[in-house]
Image (spheres, rainbow, N blue to C red):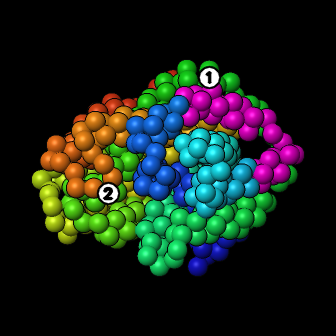
Amino acid sequence: MSALGAAWRERLPAYSLFAAILSGAGLPIYIYAPKYYADNYGVSLTLLGAVLFALRLFDVVQDPLLGWISERLAKGKAIALTFGAAVLGASMIGLFAIVPPIAPVWWFGLTITGLFTAFSFLNISFYARGVAKAGSQDGGHVRLAAWRESGALFGVCLAAVVPTLLTGTVARPYAVFAVGFASVVVVAAIAMWPEWKGRAKTEASPIGRILEDRIARRLLILALVNATPLAVASTVFLFYVESRLEAPGWEGILLVLFFFSAALSSPGWSLLARAKGEKRVLLSAMVVAVISFAATLFLGSGDVLFFAVICVLSGATIGADLTLLPAMFAKRMAAISPNGGQGFGLWSLVSKFTLAFAAATLLPLLEMSGFQSGTDNPQSARVMLTVLYALVPIVLKCVAILLLWALTLEDPGAEPSEVAVQK
């Protein structure tokens, strides 16, 4: 109870809730939004993928700039971040709850821009604040990451499954989801207000300093490669269940298994990392991920129960990815860029780029193979689904394993105090 009481005094539950709404505005949108606009408004998958990729090119400039702004905000930070939360909630309502008043593809681009711009600003500031809060105390970053990433994983779970669970029970399930999401955003913004308000501004760090750091640079490259398999699988998940497994209606249950497995495993990975080290534990999780993706190659029509087991295993490995990698990067930021804003601007850019890259490449490939959502697709399209869902992530995950294996988390030239922070 003393540990839980200390967590409440430090407002760690507020970090969990805020992480939940941020994660709910990220990955689930890439799962649902393209299919929603293709099914309801007839927008082509290729066009939707092109829009998402174009927005990520905009992020190349936007996210580092938002990190720069976040580092330099002082007294007005609480107001700015609360406004960002309002934009996040309003954009979600516009995306799913409002019938496009203009051409659907333009409305999609407009609302998704508002959503992800707000997401970037909030996410960058949120993770940078975590660097300052955890400080240099032993285990501080992993402890905060356990609360933050557990909240993020439960948030992504709920956001991923609620629209599916609402389907068939309410007239407009996505609209209900969007309004509910916006309501939770209000609560989360209120809970985090004391963490933003009155915090003194620290010295900003040039982005070049972060990119010149060998460890930070390699962690960013690792994050890019390691996040891409999840982005690939998430982009085609609904299509895979519907057309390859031929199990429409099972999407919600399978998403629940996947994401709740990730959320429930997160504290366990955190404990293992404290005992065995983040790198060793993360490598083990990556190997399990490759095995689970490989098993998917042999599934076909009706293999729902086998796929459910795979969802549990692969979901658990995602819990390790989303808990340990951000903690490793935060520890490095504490050593070289304590304010962390621009560092997490780069981290945010990497995370979103993988999702956009997956959408921009996979959706056109599916369409070219003859795939059409909600129809009886040819064998070539179903084979393409399997290749994209399983084989591509296996290759990428193996590359990530090699990158992590070669990564040294301690700088040989660092002072003893700095090395202690990195550990």
Q: From where the camera sits, is residue 195 visible?
A: no
SS category of the residue bearing label 1: helix
Q: Which residues are magenta?
A: 55-83
Query: From mark 2 to mark 1, how far is it between C-alphas?
Result: 49 Å
Residue occupying image coordinates x 75% and y 34% = 69
Q: Would you say 213 lies left or right of 73 here?
A: left
Quadrant of the image occupied by residue 347:
top right
> Three-letter amino acid code at disc 2?
Gly
Residue occupying image coordinates x 53% and y 31% = 54
Is the residue 108 above or below the residue 417 in the image? below
In the picture, the disc for residue 271 is none
In the depicted view, which residue is nearer to us: 348 or 90?
Answer: 90
Q: Position of residue 107 (x, y in %)?
A: 61, 45
Q: From where the camera sits, is residue 4 visible?
A: yes
Residue occupying image coordinates x 14% and y 57% = 300
Q: Count all numbered tags in the image, as a single digit.
A: 2
Magenta run includes residue 73: yes
> Three-letter amino acid code at disc 1?
Arg
Q: Position of residue 33 (x, y in %)?
A: 49, 52
Q: Nearer the viewer, mark 2 or mark 1?
A: 2
Q: Which residue is mark 2?
A: 374
Quadrant of the image occupied by residue 415:
top right
Q: Which residue is mark 1?
A: 209
Contact between labelled residues 1 and 2, with CB atoms less than 8 Å apart = no
In the depicted view, which residue is nearer to us: 276 or 27?
Answer: 27
Q: Position of residue 312 (x, y in %)?
A: 29, 64
SS category of the residue bearing label 2: loop
Q: Position of residue 309 (x, y in %)?
A: 23, 66
